[in-house]
Image (tube, helix red, strand yellow):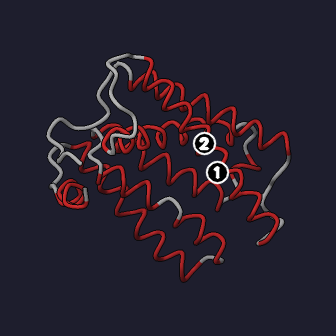
Amino acid sequence: MIPALYANLKRPPRTVVEWLADAVRAAAIVIVIVSLFTLPFTDFAVLSMSLPAVMLARMIGLRSGLDLVTCVTVFVAAGSNVIDLYRAWTGWDLVVHAVCTGVLAAIALVLLDDARVVAPSGRRRTPVVVATMAGLALSAVWEMVEWFGYRFITDAIFVTYDDTIGDMIAGGAGALAMGIVASRFRLTRADRAAL
């Protein structure tokens, strides 16, 4: 599995969209490094949590368009927290939860399929069900991280019951939408190194 992840990571970009995705990835890495020295530690931590998804999108060989959308979405989600867009723009939180959980569900689908956790059944509903379940699980974990941050790190994190449930519903809806997409289209490049 590790050699395939490395092979996908070192594969040179071939299209404009692949170059753009790599540019966003590189910018994210630079911004996170700079934030370590220029922003409060909590902001650095929030930004750095985006890097695993940004890198995994490349390492598992997502299709170039989905790779780009993943990189932009995940980094915008983290950056929106740092510049306080979630409080400034009503509804932005729900939009980001839906889209971000959707792209993370795509990563989960590919990883679960590659690890043979979910046996391919040839049925279109399998990715819909698995993506939705993965998205709801990821939403629950994220809400626990938010609660932990609020409870033990800073009370500046906005946590209420309605916000938590709304975020999980939006995340589940985004994951469901990605499952529908995955039931009709391939999520990975045809030439990727198989895991």
Q: In the visual, does 14 lie left or right of 153?
A: left
Above or below, 76 against 149 in this view is above
Above or below, 150 against 175 in this view is below
Above or below, 149 against 159 in this view is below
Q: In the visual, does 163 lie left or right of 181?
A: right
**40 or 122: nearer the eye?**
122
Q: Secondary structure at mark 2?
A: helix
Q: Residues within 10 Å of mark 2 (few under 14, many from 20)?
A: some
Q: Amino acid at mark 1?
A: Val
Q: Secondary structure at mark 1?
A: helix
- Percent position of residue 134, x then y: 53, 38
Residue 78 falls in image quadrant: bottom right
Residue 135 falls in image quadrant: top right
Question: Which residue in the protein does label 2 denote?
Answer: 137
Residue 28 falls in image quadrant: bottom left
- Marks 2/1 in contact by CB < 8 Å: the verdict is yes
- Percent position of residue 136, x then y: 61, 37
Q: CA distance from mark 2 to mark 1?
A: 6 Å
Question: Which residue in the protein does label 1 denote?
Answer: 141
**54 or 92: nearer the eye?**
54
Q: Amino acid at mark 2?
A: Ala
Residue at figure coordinates x 50%, y 59% from the top left: 50
Query: Which quadrant of the rendered structure holds the N terminus?
Result: bottom left
Residue at figure coordinates x 53%, y 32% from the top left: 175
